[in-house]
Image (cartoon, grey):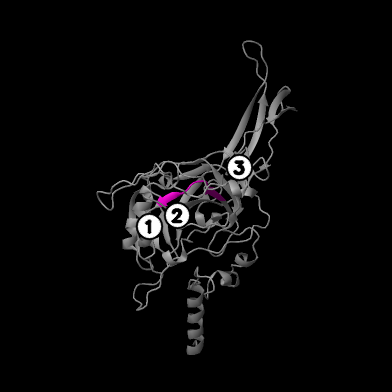
Amino acid sequence: MTSLPLLLLSMCTVAAANMETPWVYGEGLAWGPGFWGGLKDWELCRKGMLQSPIDIPPDRLLFDPGLRPIHIDRVTVASELVNTGQMPRVRIGNSQKRPPANLSGGPLNNYRYRTCAHRTTKKGQGSKSKDQRSTSRFRIQRIDIHYGREETAGNGSEHAIDGKKFPMELQLLAFNHDLYENFSMAYRSPNGIAGIAVLVEIGPETNEELLKLTVATASIQSKGKRVELADLKPWALLPYTRDFVTYQGSMTSPGCEETVTWIVVNQPIHIRADDLVEWAKLRNDFGTEELPTFQGPNSRPLQSHNKRLLRTNIQHKTTNVGFAPRTTTLDNAKECKLPLARLTYKSNVGGSAVTSRSIPAPFKIPAQTKSKTHKKRHTAHKQIDHDADLFL
């Protein structure tokens, strides 16, 4: 017969094993970012070399002519907004009635190769070459939302541009559906996660999809609360730009897995100041405490670059791309010449490129942009089409 002390010890051990490891975003607090690396199996949070978020200095970007535009499926998804206690998070589910929102393009290409098959045309002309590319499909699984409070002077974003942070940041996180079955497998595995970081600035109108989320915060004031969202369009949370910066990084919450390809878009979306206040009301407790505690700011401190490559498709200055004739031979095919471009990275440093002194004031709203009169408080707002670029 098992003695009572041994039985209690066994029960406590099982309970401890099943208990979720607590963690918070507050710097200097117990269980905060400075302690993550000593908790559980989260050693990467302390020793990792590819950690996120980072500050992105515009004068250290490298132009990569091979970067393609980002593509997000323009579909509506089944989703819910959840208060996790650390942050508000949109969870996107799988529904047979609604197709998933896939992300592709940009830096997410698997490989690139050229084939040369000899064929004779009617005019007797010879070989033709074909450029073959494969792009991984990343399925958007969740949207993490980071924001600050009025007293933190708008420092709510995780990523920074030339040392400047912003009031809010939306992170659309997608897993590599071609390689992995689900998000849980992907975020621990190479080439597993793609993250789109959308910075948010105060403006005269709130982005239409962001407004839907803002209104829904009234239903998730305390930890564990959730509310279903109708007809959410993840693609509509992005600004009207094809320009971005990309780098290899990590998850910004424990255990800081270094499996994320980050894509930071070159323009912000906007939120009204009074809408941002609604997010600041979210609590990180269960709502029964006499002294409530609030989530914001809920961002991880900036991490070291560690000489990482910051690539961009933002072409500051047009340059001629040279072509080099090359010869390749395939089985059962004749020799053919392929005009392969000599693709090189170009650093945006020096007199012929952009320096930090020439960067426009971030998010300066054009003078001709005027705020519309709101007939109803929670009606949809039209997104601003043009804004100042972040990097160039």
Q: Amino acid at mark 1?
A: Ala
Q: Earlier in the sequence, mark 1 or mark 2?
A: 2
Q: Position of residue 338 (x, y in %)?
A: 70, 26
Q: What whole-number distance in Å separates the C-alpha atoms at marks 2 and 3?
A: 24 Å
Classify 76 as above or below 330: below
Residue 3 showing in the rendered view: no
For label 1, the crowd category at 10 Å Cα-Cα, with few meaning under 14, some 14 to 19 and many 20 or more, is some
Residue 110, numbered label: 3
**Among all residues in the image, which is located at the extreme top?**
123
Q: Earlier in the sequence, mark 2 or mark 3?
A: 3
Quarter placement of the C terminus: top right
Q: Nearer the viewer, mark 2 or mark 3?
A: 2
Instruction: Give me the C-alpha separation between circle 1 and circle 2.
Output: 21 Å
Task: Tell whether position 268 is magenta.
Answer: yes
Q: Pointer 1 and pointer 2: residues touching (CB < 8 Å)?
A: no
Residue 207, image x and y in percent?
38, 49
Helix or strand or loop: what does disc 1 sit on? helix
Q: Residue furthest left?
A: 375
> Would residue 71 appear left or right of 367 to someone viewing this image?
right
Query: Residue beneath label 1, please?
Result: 273
Name the residue nearer the viewer: 267 or 216: 267
Look at the image and give the residue range highlighted in magenta.
Answer: 262-270
Q: Which residue is mark 2?
A: 143
